[in-house]
Image (spheres, grey):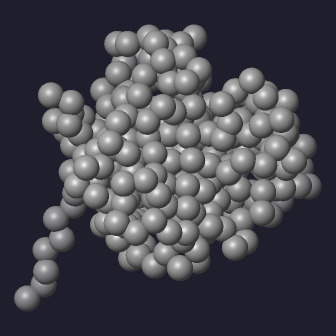
Amino acid sequence: MASIKIPKSWQISEQEVTPEDIYLRRREFLGTSLKLGSATMAAIYGFSPFTNGWSAEPEQFSPSTITPEIIASRFNNFYEFGVEKQEIWKSSRKLQTEGWRIEVGGLVKNPQTLEFETLKFPEEERIYRLRCVEAWSVVIPWIGFPLRLLIDKLEPLASARYIKFTTFLDPIIAPGQKKRFWEPWPYTEGLRLDEARHDLTFMATGIYGHPLPNQHGAPLRLVIPWKYGFKSIKSIARIEFTREEPETFYTSLSPLVYDFDANVHPDIPYARWHQAFERIPGQEETVKTLPYNGYANQVAGLYL
């Protein structure tokens, strides 16, 4: 008797996945991009990765259509390597991820140092929306495992209520950490343990069918699709379990603007950017932002 596979409530419909012929054109594009100028690429493929926006012709992308990898990989925030989004994919090449280690401490049964290569969990692909507080968004196919699997392996103590993440600190290869010395480097983020154990909370080790490149947070990053993108910390180097809410990079800088929860709420203005609408690759017009970035049915109950 054939088994019945029941899709999870958060899964994006297969009808909205990029058609195979378009996906394969991405491979064609990657093979020819170095030979073409940005104007030529825009004319042929409908976008240019070397500008601040995307051309609307000839392809149109719905809010749930996978973002072409050439856009997602060359339009990044990773302030350790600068503030120019279009340059991060190049400047982040200096980050050495071979032999990456992750320190584990705080309220945990066994403080230890993990070798990234020894993290063996069943891999799966998750297609998630990613919403930046700067009012743009993308849809990314991640590869990795639910964070709760790692938490269970680490065995936090019963007194632990939060989990804090810290990225690397190396001003020699990360000019942002040196030039922006007034900021509280290294970058840190945190979650309540119930948020961290939620099925949607994901540890990404790959993207678009291959390992994470540096600009996406190699070798290990957090992905929390219902929160603003700055919560999804990149290149995790330390995990700590705490009793009290941890101070994070942005709550240290401006706690009244960058709140710890950082849930996507369209009706709440955020810093310099409105949140009711967002820009989508391939569209000139903005679209309405969804409560909790479209995951309200799954996570709203966490905040009642």
Q: Position of residue 154 (x, y in %)?
A: 37, 67
Q: Residue 264: where, in percent of width, then height?
A: 38, 27
Please name whichever residue, 48 or 74, is drawn nearer the observer in this view of the structure. Answer: 74
> In this view of the protein, can residue 280 be seen by the observer?
no
Say which residue appears at 71% left-offset and 56% top-offset.
214
Q: Is residue 174 left or right of residue 191?
A: right
Query: What residue is at 21 percent from the left and 51 percent from the top?
Result: 9
Query: On screen, 19 above or below 87?
Result: below
Q: Quadrant of the C terminus?
A: top left
Q: Which quadrant is the N terminus positioned in?
A: bottom left
Residue 118 seen by the camera: yes
Instruction: Say whether residue 257 is left or right of residue 173.
Output: left
Relative to 269, is 24 above or below? Answer: below
Where residue 217 appears, x then y in whole percent? 63, 53
The residue that appears at 87% across and 47% down in the rendered structure is: 172
- In the rendered picture of this protein, how many numbered marks are placed on residues? 0
